Image: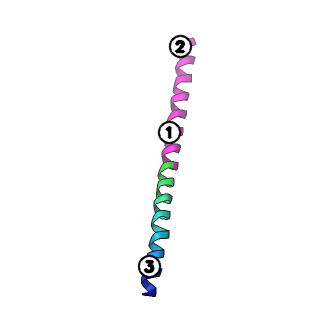
Amino acid sequence: MKDEIYFSVYKITTVPLTRVFAFACLRFSFLRFIKEVSGCFFIICRALKLAALN
């Protein structure tokens, strides 16, 4: 009985934590990906502007 209680407490605490952790990792990498893409886009736009001016 004691082990079952421990297991349920373990499940209640670790499962949400691992989900939150995985979500945070995904979200972080997704935000970084967006940042990289927008940075590249910004550089391309600047290059096009310079090319248009010349």
Would you say residue 42 is visible in this rendering?
yes
Question: Is-magenta flag for residue 52?
Answer: yes
Which SS class for mark 1?
Answer: helix
Q: Amino acid at mark 2?
A: Ala
Q: Looking at the image, which residue sits at the far bottom? A: 1
Amino acid type, residue under disc 3 in the picture: Phe
Which residue is under mark 3?
Answer: 7
Q: CA distance from mark 3 to mark 2?
A: 66 Å
Q: Which residues are magenta?
A: 28-54
Residue 7 is situated, as x and y percent measured from the top left of the image, at 44, 79
Name the residue located 57 percent from the left edge and 12 percent from the top edge.
53
Picture colour scheme: rainbow
Please state the horizontal and vertical placement of residue 5, each as a whole percent of the image: 45, 81
Q: What quarter of the picture does the N terminus occupy?
A: bottom left
Mark in front: 1 vs 2: 1
Q: Amino acid at mark 1?
A: Ile
Q: Which residue is mark 1?
A: 34
Q: Nearer the viewer, residue 15 or 32?
A: 15
Residue ID at (52%, 20%) = 48
Label 2 sits on residue = 52
Q: Regarding mark 2 in the picture, which secondary structure is present there?
A: helix
Q: Secondary structure at mark 3?
A: helix
